[in-house]
Image (cartoon, rainbow, N blue to C red):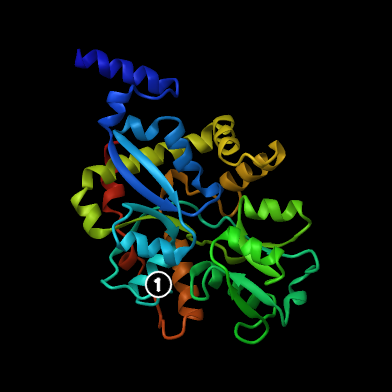
Amino acid sequence: MFRSVRILGAALLAFGLALPAASAQSLEKVRMIGFSGASNLPIWLAMDKGLFAKHGLDVTLARTKGSKNQIRDMMANKYDIATTAMDNVVAYTESQGAVKLDQPFDMVAFMGVHSGMNTVVGVPSIKTFADIKGKPVAVDAPNTGYAFVLFKILDQNGLKFGKDYTLHAAGSGGARLAAMKEGKAVAAVMSAPNDTEAKAMGYTMLAPAASALGGYQGSVYAARKGWAKANEATMVKFIRAIVDAHDVIFTDAAAAKAVLKKHLKKLKAAEIDTIYTSLTSGDGGLNRKAEINLAGVGTVLALRSEFQKGAGNLSDPNKYLDLGYYQKAMSGK
């Protein structure tokens, strides 16, 4: 009987169908929190195509309003795994985060989401970087990684941090776009679909971050050390499911675009095509097999060393990573 149930479950998953209710209830629950945007494609695909269920997991994904809320929620054990900026892990490990925590920060990155999917975007009146001078730019928080990405690219284009522009702390990508619409800022770093929406409104695409900076580890999959250690088998299952999802995205464009269309309903087919291309090609995009981009982590450390007062020279990526779970998961594949 049990063999028949397993065969039925495998057949249903092969056709992208849900498992029967009783089987679904037996799946291990994993609570995730992340930001909105197209970089969630691996998670959406693993949910929609049964890849998490195939590995015995029932994964939910909550949307955070910003990095401050996300870190607080992770440290309060409201969630098990986060997709967050690599720089957030570095910042809070170094006690430089945007909020003070009641307990020692213990999150580590164990897989990579993408190596830069961000674009510097200006409102229609901003045609060149020089037009930004003397005006406000929107950031998530002033001392977070994507803010540093913006500072560095502005610096490359002759605008000095702390001198040639002011800051408006807005929160997530959607909030940054809203701030620009409301006239509170003239430029920001943002990713799909927010940059796609901005382009459709006539906003100026000033520079792709990945090309401007070279290697950069953008978002990562991260967990608290204690939870990961206590749930090693779950970590291995999660990693295998996510790696499978990243593989599908690079090998089955039609399936990946269908998932994007389902979750980004407002976008037209041509916009979906553009986003898929940005996810799978160029200097940034999703990390193949969800591997950590070690050179990109080095760029994250270099930017924090440059722009965070008192940061010192951060140079050891292993302080913020635990790749043992990934290695264990991949050794069995």
Where is residue 262 shown, x and y percent of the image?
57, 35
Position of 72 relative to 96 (above/below): above
Is residue 330 at all visible to an observer of this figure? no
Of residues 19 and 304, the one nearer the viewer is 19
Where is residue 287 shown, x and y percent of the image?
48, 49
Q: Residue at x 54, y 61 (%)?
A: 172
Res. 138 image quadrant: bottom right
333 to the left or right of 300: left
Of residues 265 and 133, the one nearer the viewer is 265
291 to the left or right of 284: left
Question: What is the quadrant of the C terminus in the image?
Answer: top left
Res. 120 image quadrant: bottom right
The amino acid type found where label 1 is placed reads: Ala
Q: Which residue is mark 1?
A: 91
Q: Residue at x 58, y 60 (%)?
A: 173
How many callouts does the rendering have?
1
Where is residue 110 shown, x and y percent of the image?
34, 54
Question: What is the quadrant of the N terminus in the image?
Answer: top left
Q: Residue at x 76, y 76 (%)?
A: 130
Where is residue 51 shown, x and y percent of the image?
39, 33
Label 1: how many Cα within 10 Å (few below 14, some 14–19, many 20+): many
Is residue 17 at all visible to an observer of this figure? yes
Q: Residue at x 51, y 42 (%)?
A: 41
Position of 38 relative to 245 (above/below): below
Q: Secondary structure at mark 1?
A: helix
172 to the left or right of 17: right
Of residues 161 and 139, the one nearer the viewer is 139
Position of 243 relative to 10 (above/below): below
